[in-house]
Image: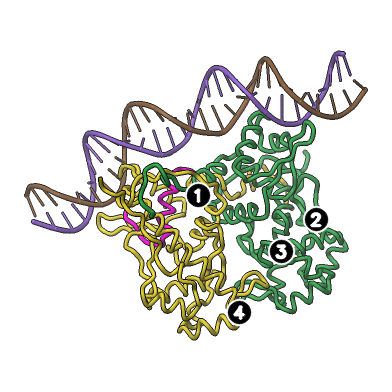
Chain colours: A yellow, B green, C purple, D brown
DNA sequence: CGGACGATTCGGTTCTCACCGAAGTGTTAT
DNA sequence: ATAACACTTCGGTGAGAACCGAATCGTCCG
């Protein structure tokens, strides 16, 4: 038995790492994936404009990304909506981005400079909060004993109580496939912010209670007035992460 | 203050996801990285032969991988030794491989078929145990209450006691930067095996006590006779993951 | 010192792929 | 119906990169 046979059992399966990486190895496709890290659904045309390529080019890229399993699509009439395939995809992309080298990019306009500042301050990362606000939340929760670093990073009993007091029942962050608490390396600060099911539940809660609002077609988050009060009273977050960074001003006229 | 100035503050830094992915987007470079997932140190020539390319080609690939931060190198005389840059690199590669599509590869020889069987059975995954053996360890530990899925996957008190009874003190898996317990999606079985600091400590312990032995210049692990006894008495692992899978035999002569 | 050896540099070939524009398909709006 | 719209298909172009072989550099050994 189990005798070698050139016809039978002459093939096997191997994960094709190069094929997956090739999907992300293009500037335009990488930009598309990073845009979709806001967790939203974009149309093909929006992504084409965002990436600065012709619609026909965007079509080709989306075909590759969808058939490669990185993106999920939905057709409605003449529109093509795409989003990331799932939380697992988003997490892997985040990890990869955390490992990637930095590249100098030119800032071309005042608007771009302000956009970048806002992104550094607070943004979505698929389904949780990133940026200075996200980092501050994770660190403050750890300091206050709501999260513990003892065995990895876990929610403490005090942390579960705190979530319940906010009105987030345990069912709100029950693990389907994802770990309750995960950390995600922040691009901008190179520090950890809160991810996983708890991070997602906290993000949903903050949105529902309008602690934060999300700008349309962008990853930017803004802390509302009531959000400032809530983050201060519930977590004691310092003022600097709750107030928007001052905008860059246009040069003085002559 | 903070006034826009075309000269000043006209550049910013962005993680270059595409550049990192481009490193892995080549078959040869991907093969090199996967080979190095055994956690070992290889010479340039060994990798060239393994990947089936000329030494000059291997040199170019290694230059890219090293300067991209994925590999660390060490020169000794006329030799060039390379290895993965660190545990974080290995984990990201594993995650990526778990997300990658499968590809059919031809099995060309009897030796290759047997090599593949052995890999499926038990192998190293950077610094911990993967394959059927690794999956069985993770699942049995969970069944026995040594690991709990409650908040992510964590070591229970019983688990810490069990490790201590084996002679693995808590210092042996103290977190430097890595989480104690992590899971890693197994390529071959698509199930989780144990990773993180605990996984690494367990692997080291098994090697030191010769429960397992590592084949030279390969990721293959073999369970020793004393290892079979230990895994059975300590964890109650079933026999099928402790005995090597029967080798494929050459075809009968005429 | 001279030869063997591991690794590197360089030139040249080949091939893949990202891109665009123009034309085409199907959907929604007037 | 006709027009505007979102997207797609296709052909052609240009840039980039993977590869090898030959020559070279530096190290180790006899």
Residue under circle 3? B197
**Residue B222's disc number:** 2
Q: Chain of mark 2?
A: B
Q: Which residues are magenta?
A: A25-43
SS label for mark 2: strand
The x, y position of residue A121, in whole percent, is 44, 62
Residue under circle 4? A156
- Which mark is nearer the camera, 3 or 2? 3
- Mark 1 vs 2, N-terminal side: 1
Q: Chain of mark 4?
A: A
Above or below, B77 against A187 in this view is: above
Measure the alpha-carbon separation of dots 3 and 4: 20 Å
Measure the alpha-carbon separation of dots 4 and 1: 33 Å
Callout 3–callout 2 Cβ contact below 8 Å: no
**Residue A221's disc number:** none
Whether residue B65 is visible, yes or no, is yes
Label 4: how many Cα within 10 Å (few below 14, some 14–19, many 20+): some
- Discs 4, 2: same chain: no
Residue under circle 1? B15
Front position in the image: A70 or B222: A70
Callout 3–callout 4 Cβ contact below 8 Å: no
Front position in the image: C12 or A196: A196
The residue lying at 63 percent from left, 30 percent from top is B57
- Mark 3 vs 1, N-terminal side: 1
- Which mark is nearer the camera, 3 or 1? 1
Q: Is residue A32 magenta?
A: yes
The x, y position of residue B85, in whole percent, is 67, 48
Label 2: how many Cα within 10 Å (few below 14, some 14–19, many 20+): many
Label 1: how many Cα within 10 Å (few below 14, some 14–19, many 20+): some
Above or below, B155 against C15 in this view is: below
């Amino acid at each position: 038995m189990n005798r070698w046979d050139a016809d039978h059992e002459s093939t096997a399966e191997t994960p094709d790492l190069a094929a997956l990486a090739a999907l992300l190895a293009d500037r335009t496709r990488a930009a598309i994936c990073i845009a979709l890290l806001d967790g939203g659904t974009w149309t093909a045309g929006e992504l084409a404009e965002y990436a600065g390529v012709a619609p026909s080019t965007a079509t080709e890229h989306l075909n590759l990304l969808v058939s490669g399993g990185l993106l999920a699509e939905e057709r409605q009439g003449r529109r093509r909506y795409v989003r990331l395939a799932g939380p697992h995809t988003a997490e892997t992309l985040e990890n990869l981005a955390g490992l990637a080298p930095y590249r100098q990019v030119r800032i071309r306009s005042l608007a771009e400079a302000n956009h970048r500042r806002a992104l550094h301050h607070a943004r979505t990362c698929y389904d949780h909060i990133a940026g200075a606000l996200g980092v501050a939340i994770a660190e403050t929760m750890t300091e206050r004993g709501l999260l513990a670093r003892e065995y990895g990073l876990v929610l403490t009993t005090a942390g579960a109580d705190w979530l319940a007091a906010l009105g987030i029942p345990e069912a709100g962050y029950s693990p389907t496939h994802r770990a309750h608490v995960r950390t995600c390396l922040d691009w901008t600060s190179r520090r950890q912010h809160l991810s996983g099911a708890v991070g997602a539940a906290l993000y949903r809660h903050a949105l529902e209670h309008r602690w934060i609002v999300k700008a349309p077609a962008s990853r930017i988050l803004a802390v509302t007035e009531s959000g400032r009060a809530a983050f201060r009273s519930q977590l004691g977050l310092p003022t600097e992460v709750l107030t928007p960074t001052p905008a860059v001003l246009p040069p003085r006229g002559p």
